Amino acid sequence: KILIANPMGHIADTAFGAGALHWYDAWFGLVGYAFQIYFDFSGYSDMAIGLGRMFGFHFPENFAHPYAAQSIRDFWRRWHISLSTFFRDYVYIPLGGNRLGAARSALNLSLVFVLCGFWHGASWAFVVWGAFHGACLSAERLGLDRLIARLPLPARWAYTMTLVMVGWVFFRCETLSHAGMVLAAMAGAGPAAADAGGWQGAIDAQVVLTMVVGAVAAVGAPVALYDRIAARLRATGGAIAEGALQVAGIAFVALVMYASTVTLVSSGFNPFIYYRF
C-alpha cells in the first residue's frame, strides 16, 4: 500500500488529471493506476486479514494474483473474491445461474455485472465498467473461452490484461467523456497538446523501479520463488534451514516495516481510493 500503491497513485492522478495525453502517457498512467488499485485494495485486505487473525478470526484471501489471469473469467475468480462470491451466491444463482442454457447464463452474467458496477457508485462510468466486464464474460461463456484456450499462454495473458486495462479507464474516470478522451489517447487518436507528457518530470528511476517491482509482485513471482527455495532448503537442511527461513522472514518484514514507516512519515501523499466503497 505505501511502497507501491502510493507512488503509482501519484503517477495515475497526474496522468488522468492532464488535459491532453500522448498515447504513451495515457498507457503509462493507466499502468500506474492498475498497480495502484491492486496494491491499494489488496494491501488493505491483507491488513484486515492480519488484524482479524490477531483477534482469532481467520478471513480468506481476497486476491489471488489476478494480474496473472488467463481470461476474464479467470480474472474474476482472483479479483475481489469476497464481492464476486457475494454476487454469485445472492444474485447470479438466484437468477438461474448457468442452469438455463448458455444464452440465459450470458444474460445473467451481464445483469450481475451491471449491478456490480452500480454497487461501486451511482455513476454511468461505473455502470459501463460493469457492463463491459459482463459483456466479456458473456462472450467467453458463449464460446470465446474455447478459442482463447487454444492460444499460447502469453497471448491469453495479453488478451486478458488488455481488456482489464480498458475496463480500468471507466473505473478511474468520473465521466464517460473523460473516459472517451483517455481511450482515444491510448489509441493514438486523442488531441494531444504540444506539451502533453511534460508531467513525466515526476518519473524518475525510483518510480520505474517501483513499477518493475510491482509487475513482478503482481503475478506472484516472489511467492513462487520463495516457496521453491524454501522447499529445497527444508528437504536438505532440516531444522537449521527452517530456523534460517524464519530469521530471514522476520528480517524481511522488519525491513519493509521500516521502509514503510519512513515513507509514510516523509510523504504527504497517502490516498485511500476505496473509502467510497
Image (cartoon, grey):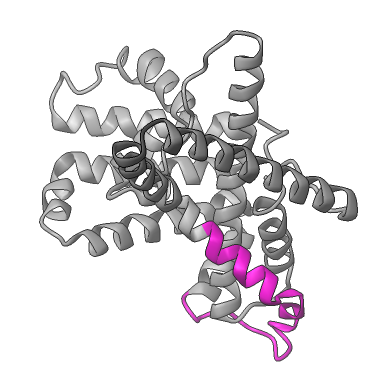
Q: Quadrant of the C terminus?
A: top right
Of residues 57 and 103, the one drawn nearer to the viewer in this rendering: 57
Left or right: 147 as drawn, with respect to 50: left
Examine the rendered structure and indicate whether residue 179 appears above or below residue 190: above
x 59%, y 31%: residue: 46
Residue 78 covered by magenta stretch: no
Position of 44 relative to 192 (above/below): above
Q: Quadrant of residue 249?
A: top right
Could you tell me which residue is drawn at 69 percent across and 70 percent down?
A: 206
Residue 35 in picture, x, y percent from top left: 57, 54
Residue 261 in picture, x, y percent from top left: 81, 45
For the point 62% across and 52% down, the residue is: 36
Compared with 266, 102 (above or below) is above
**Image: magenta residue range:** 187-214
Q: Nearer the viewer, residue 61 or 19?
A: 61
* Residue at the spot 42% in from the left edge and 43% down from the top edge: 65
- Asked if the magenta segment contains residue 201, the reply would be yes
Which quadrant would residue 180 be assigned to in this image? Answer: bottom right
Q: Percent x, y for residue 10?
A: 74, 61
What quarter of the picture does the N terminus occupy?
top right
Give coordinates of residue 11: x percent, y percent: 69, 65
* 222, 43: nearer the viewer: 222
Left or right? Give the position of 205 relative to 109. Answer: right
Q: Quadrant of residue 274?
A: top right
